[in-house]
Amino acid sequence: MIRRRSHYSAFTLFKEGLLGQVGWQPTWASPEPKPAYDAIVVGGGGHGLATAYYLAKNHGLPNVAVIEKGWLGGGNTGRNTTVVRSNYFYPESVALYDFALRLYEGLSRELNYNIMLSQRGMVVVAHSEFEMEISARLVNAMQINGVDAELFSREQVIEIAPAMNARPDARYPIFGGVWQSRAGVARHDAVAWGYARGASHLGVDIIQNCEVLDFIFEAGRCCGVVTSLGEIRAGRVGLAVAGHSSVLAAKAGFQLPIQSYALQAMVSEPVKPVLDTVVLSLGTGTYVSQSDKGELVFGGGLDRIPSYAQRGNPPLQEQVISGLVEMFPAFGQLKLLRQWAGIVDIVPDSSPIIGPSPLPGLYLNCGWGTGGFKAIPAGGWLLAHLMAIGSHHEISRPFDLGRFTSGRLIDEAAGSGIAH
Amino acid sequence: MRLASFGTAVDSTKPLNFTFDGMACQGLAGDTVASALLAAGVRVVGRSFKYHRPRGIWGHGSEEPNAIFDVSCGIDREPNARGTTTQLSEGLRVRSVNASPNASRDTYGLFDAFARFIPAGFYYKTFMWPDWQRFEPRIRAMAGLGCIDKVWSPKSFSRQVNSTCDVLVVGAGRSGLAAASRAAKDGKSVMIVDEGIEPGGTLLYRSRLIEGVSASDWLCETLIELERRDVRMLSRATAYGVYDHNLVCVSELKGGFAPPDLWRIRTSEIVIATGAIERPLVFPNNDRPGVMSAASALFYLRRYGVRVGERVVIASNNDSTGEIANAFRDAEAKVIEVAAVKDVKGRHGIEAVIDSEGRSIAADALLVSGGFTPTVHLYCQNKGRLRWSESHAAFLPGKPVEGMRVVGSAAGDFGWTVSAAWAAKPGKTRAWIDFQNDVTLKDLAQAARENYRSVEHVKRYTTLGMATDQGKTSNLNGLVAMAALTGRSIAETGTTTYRPPYTPTSLMAFTGVRHGELFNPVRRLALEPEHRAAGAVFREYGGWLRPAAYGSDIQAEALRARETVGIFDGSPLGKIDVIGPDAGALLDFNSYGTISTLRPGRLRYGFMLQETGIVYDDGVIARVDEYRFVVSCSSSHVQGVYQRLEEWRQDQFDPSRVYIHNATPRWATLTVTGPRSRQLLKELDLGLDIGLAELPHMAFVLGSFEGGPARVARVSFSGDLSFEVSVPLSKAVLLFHAMRRASTPLGGILLGLEAMMILRAEKGYIVIGKDTDGLTMPHDLGHTGPRDKRTDEFVGRRALFTDWAMGRDRRQLVGLAVAEGEAALPTGSHGIERVNGKLRSVGYVTSSYFSPTLRRPIALGLIERGAARQGDTVKFQYLGREREATIVAPCFIDPEGTRLHV
Amino acid sequence: MQLISCPFCGLRDETEFRFGAEAGKRRGTASSSAEEWANYLYFQGNPKGQTREIWVHLACGEFFMLERDSMTHEIHQSYCIRKEDQK
C-alpha cells in the first residue's frame, strides 16, 4: 500500500509558501499496529528505519512494522556527532563502510529528503613519526581497497584546519595526517526522518511509543514480539537497538559479546565558520566538526563505567574539552552549550554484528559501538537482505556472530591505529 | 532613560565609557551591558537567527534570548556574551551579532519579507539538486552568531576546586537563604551558589514584608547571620549540572575576561532554590523591541534606575504585575494595563499596542508576564520527574529525589496567582515562541501537521529551545501550543530532556590547567639534564621523553655503536619484581614460554599473550633466586603488565604466596652495547667478573656501584655484546659520567633511540606494536615451541587453537630485501596481489631503514604466509607507486649469533 | 562522577577504579570447546539494572566484587572476592 506524500522541492516549497504551508502531508504515518506483519524491525533508529525501507524497496516486502520504544531517531541516531567516513583498514570494513558512504551519497535524492550530506573531508591527525608510519599504512590500505585517501603533510593539515595548534613545541605537534575527502557530516535527524518518510510511503507501519517486552516463541523459532500495545506476529524479526541489544537478547534467551557504555557528545554555542572539515586527533582524544548552524560538535572516548544511563560524566567531559582546546586553542573562547550521552554497544573487536541470531527467525544488527551513524544505509540494506533472503549478503558475512567462535575478529583499532 | 533617584546596584559617580556597534555610550559602574544599553536608550540590540528581525532586551538573567553580543577589550574577547549577565567595564566594545553592518540597519533584514518561503525545516525539502554542498557554504556563512579570533590562545587558566558540604543551596533568593539559614542553625556545613552579581534574587527588587520586616532588611540580616555561621557564598556562580551521587558542578565567573572557576561540590543534600523564569505571552509580533519581561523591567528600574519606557503598557496573566505598574507610575511613567494584546506596531521599537478590543494604545514599552516556569533543570538532571499543575500553569517537581529538595518558586511557591492564558490558534501574523531561533506558532502548527509531534521531534524539527538561551523562556509555551495543536493534554505532551549545562559555560572552566605539557604530562628520565647537555634531541616514545639522537647523523651513531661501543638510556624499561614461592608458577601462567625452569642468575626472552592469543608484550625475565624474578617489559606496557600480573595473581593463585612490586621508577638503566662494551664496563668499579665464562649471554649478576646495588644483565637488543647496568636512581648521574669517561678512549658514543631502532632491525628484533599488530600471535613471529609443546595452562593458550589462529593465510614476520641500489621501502607500504583483477593487500612493511652496517636497505614486515615464502618477490605499493621486494629471513646480520656470544 | 566503595579503602571517586568483568564466569581452558572459549572470552549478560561485577581499585590494587545498578548508578555493595579476606 503506497501512502500519499508531498514531493519536496524548491517549487513545492515556494507553492506552499504562497498557500501558508498548510498542504504538507505527514512525513510518516502513525497507524495502529496490525496483529501480524511479514516482518518486524525492532528499533526506530536509523538502522531500523533503513532496514524497513530497504525491505520494502529492494525486496518488495512492504508489510513491515518498525517498533520503537520512544520516538523515532531518539537513540544514538539522534545523539551522535554526525560524522560519515570510510577510512578503514581491513577490506571487510572498507566494503561495509564504503558501501554505506556510497549509499549516503545518493540518499537525499533517493529519499527526496535533504539529509545535508556535506562531504567536507576529514583528517585524522598524526602527532609523531610513528603515527605518520601508521597513517601511511592506513592510506595505502584504503587506496588498495579502492577508497579515496591521501597522506597529508604537516602543511596540508594546517592549511585545511588553520585554527589548529601548529606550534612545533605543542604537546601534540602536527606531523601530518590521513585525509579522506569523501568523509564529512550529515544531518542525523534527517537521516532517520528521511528513511521513515520513505518507508512509510512504501507502506511500512511505523509504531512509536511501543516497547517490546518479549518475543513470541513457537517451535524454537521467533514468531513475533509481545509489546506494550499487545502481541504482533511476524515470521522474521530484526533487531536494531544498539546499546539495548543485550537486554532484548536476554529476553530471546542468548547473550551477545557486547558491553554498553555511555558515549558523550557536546556542542558549543554557534559561531561564524571557523572549521571547514572534520578533525580527529588520537593524541588529544578529541574529534570535532562545525555544524551548519555554527556550533562546534565534538566528542571523545567512552565513559569508563559500563552504563545504560544516557548521561555524561564530568571526568571525561573535562578530558575531552581539554583535548579540544589543546588542539584548537582559539576554541577556548567558546562556551559549552549542551552535553549529552548515548548508550553504545561496544564489541571486543569494535566491528558490528550483522547476521542471524541463535534464535531462528531473529536477526541481528548491532555492535556498531561509537560508529553506527555512518553505516546506517549499509546496516539497513544488509539486515533487510538477511531478513528477506534468509542468508548473508557478501558484505555482511564477515560480520556474523560466528566470528567470535572461529576467532576471525575484525579489529580495526589493531590494524589501523584508529580507535572508533 | 536613567532616573536619578533609583538604582541600588550602580554608582552614579563612576561613569564607564563603552561602545555599541561602534557608537560611543556611557554607563555606570555596577551596570550590566544590558542595563547600560537600556539606559542609553538603545532599543535594537541584535537580530534574530533566521529572519534577522530587530530585537530588544527581553530579560535580566541567563534566560535572555536576544541580547547576545561579541564583547572585547584590547586583545580580550568573548563571543556570544549575554548582555544581561556581562558586567560593564571601561572601554568595553560591544558588537551585535548576526547583524551587518549593525543591529539597527541589517542588510539581511529583508529575509523577514520572505519568511513564508523558509518555514520550519525548509532545508530538508530543498537544496537537493545538484547537491547540498553547492548551497552549504553560503548558508554556513549566514548562520552562527558571534565570531571568534582564530589566533587567540588562553592566557590564564581556570581554578578547579573540589569541595564538600552537608547542604548545598542553589539560589540565594528568599527561599534559598532561608533554607541555608535553617541548615546552618542545625549545625550543618552549608554552601550557597547564586547566579546573581549579589545575593538576594527577587528580594533585590521586589518589595514585600518578610517576617515583619522589609525585604531589604531581611536580606541584610540574613546575610550577616549566614556569614557569622561560616556559610560560604559564591556569587555569579552557576550550578550547571548535577552528576552521579550528588556531585554538583558550578562555574563561578571571575569578572572581566578571566576564565571562570570550576567547583565540584559533593554534598549530602542539594536544596534547589533557583526560582522561576517569567514567560512571554504569545501574541502576534510579540518579539518586537520594547516587548519585555515585566519582572525584568522592574529589575532594571529598581536596581539600575533605568526606566524602560515612558508610556508603558502592561499585559499579564497573573497578579505579579500590580507592583510593577505602581513602580512605573511612581517613576512618572504613564501606565496602562490591558487584558490581552492583539498586535504590536513598530518595527524597530514599539510605537503602539493593539489591545484585545482592537484599540491602539500609543506606547514605547510593553511589559508582559505570561506566568512563571520553575527552574527545575537540576532536579530533572537528577532523574526527577515533573508533574503538570494546571493551577500554577507550570510543570512542578514531582516525587522527591533522594538527596535533593526543591523549595520556593522552583517548587511552584510563586506568591502569585496565575491564570493560564495560552495562545489561541496560529493566526495570519506570526507570534513568536522561541525568539533567538525564530520559531513561531505557525512553525509548530506545521510540525504538528507533518507529524513531528513528539516534543523531541518538535524541538529538533523547528529548533525550538535549541538556541543559546536553551529555551528557558520558550519551551513551555512551545509544548503548550503543541498540546493544543495535537489535541493532547499538556501532561501527556511532556517535556524535552534537561541537559547540562544549565547555562552556556566557558570551555576554559573545564580545562583547568590541562594545557600544553600538563594536558598529558610526559614521563621524564632522571638523566634528562645530562642527555641535554650531551646534545640529545628528545622525542616522546610511549609516554616517555627520551633521547632520539645526539646529533643529526643517526646512521653514524648506529655504525659507531656497531664498531665500538654505545651508551643507551634504557631506564623506562619495566622492572617488575615477582616474589614468593608461587612466583615461578604465576609467571608460567602469564607467559607464552615456561619461566619456572630458568636457573637463578639466568634470563629468558618471551612473550605475554592476551587471552585472545594476541601478543601483548615481549620482554626478558630474570631469575634472581628461588623465589624472586624480575620482569623487564616494554616501557609503555609497564602499567599493563603489572596490572595483568596482579589480576591473575589474585584470580588464580594464593596471593599470600606471590607478590608483585613495580620497581621501575626506582632504577635507572644504562645499556652499553658494541664490541668494546666489556672493555667499557671493566673500567667501572662494579666488583664483578664479567668475562664470557662468568657472565655469558642471557645471564646476570648483582654487583655494586658507588655503595649501592648494581644489576648487570647480559642481554642485547642490538645483536652485539651488550650489558644492561641498573642502579638506583640516586646513582644514575654517577654511572652516566663514569660510563662516558670510560667510553671516550674506546671511541664510544651516546646512542639515541632512533639509532637503536636501526640496530635492532638489522638483527630482526621486533618492537611490539610496530612489528606486530592486534592480530599477531606468537607463532606468526616464528615462536611455535610453547604452543606445540606446553601441556600446562597459560594465558591465551586456547585462543592459539581457534580455526582462525590455525588458518593458513596468517600474516607472518618476514624480512624484506630490495634490489641493489634501490631506496628503502617506506614503512607502511603494503604488499599487493591481484585476485580476479582486484587489488588486495597481503600485508605491510612494519619497519624499514637503511642499514649502516650492511650499506643497503633492510625492512621487516607482516606478510601472508610469509614464513614459507622466502625468496618470493612481492609487489609493494606506497601512495600509488609500486615497488618490488624479496622475502628473506627477518634477521640481516649475524644470524648465527657470533657477535653475541663473545 | 560516581563514588565507589573499595572494601579495603572505603569510598573513592570512580576515576580510581577500573571495571574488570562481569562476575560469575569460569575461565576456559585448553580443553574448552570453541563455543565455550568464545563464551568465556567474549559473551556476557550486560544487564540493564542490577549487576554483579569484578572491579579493581587501582590505588590499592585489589580486585573486589561490586553490586550496582547500571541504569540508576546506585551502588549497592562491594565485598572481597576471597573468603579469607571477608572477616
Image: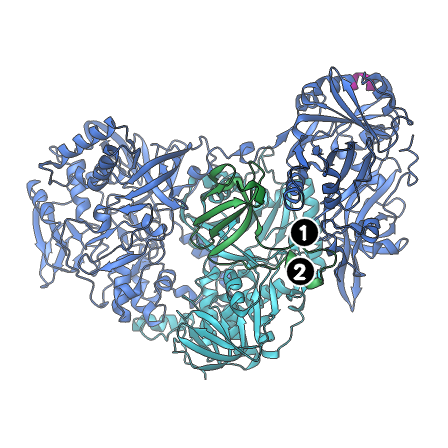
Chain colours: A cyan, B blue, C green
Tell me the quarter of the image containing the N terminus of chain B. Answer: top left
- Disc 2: which residue: C38
Residue shown at the point (39%, 78%) measured from the top left: A31
The chain that hosts pointer 1 is A
Q: Secondary structure at mark 1?
A: helix
Residue type at tag 1: Ala
Q: How many marks?
A: 2
Quarter of the rendering containing residue A87: bottom right
Q: Secondary structure at mark 2?
A: helix
Indicate left or right for B255 with B412 as reference: right
What is the residue that sits farthest to the bottom in this orientation?
A1
Give the numbered dot on residue B875: none
State whether residue A274 appears in this view: no
Q: Nearer the viewer, mark 2 or mark 1?
A: 2
- Front residue of B602/A228: it is B602
Asked if residue A163 is positioned above or below residue B155 in the image, the reply reads: below
- Disc 1: which residue: A414
Q: Which residues are magenta?
A: B739-743
- Front residue of B408/B554: it is B408
Asked if residue B515 is positioned above or below residue A38 in the image, the reply reads: above
Q: Position of residue A159 (x, y in %)?
A: 58, 45
Residue type at tag 2: Ala
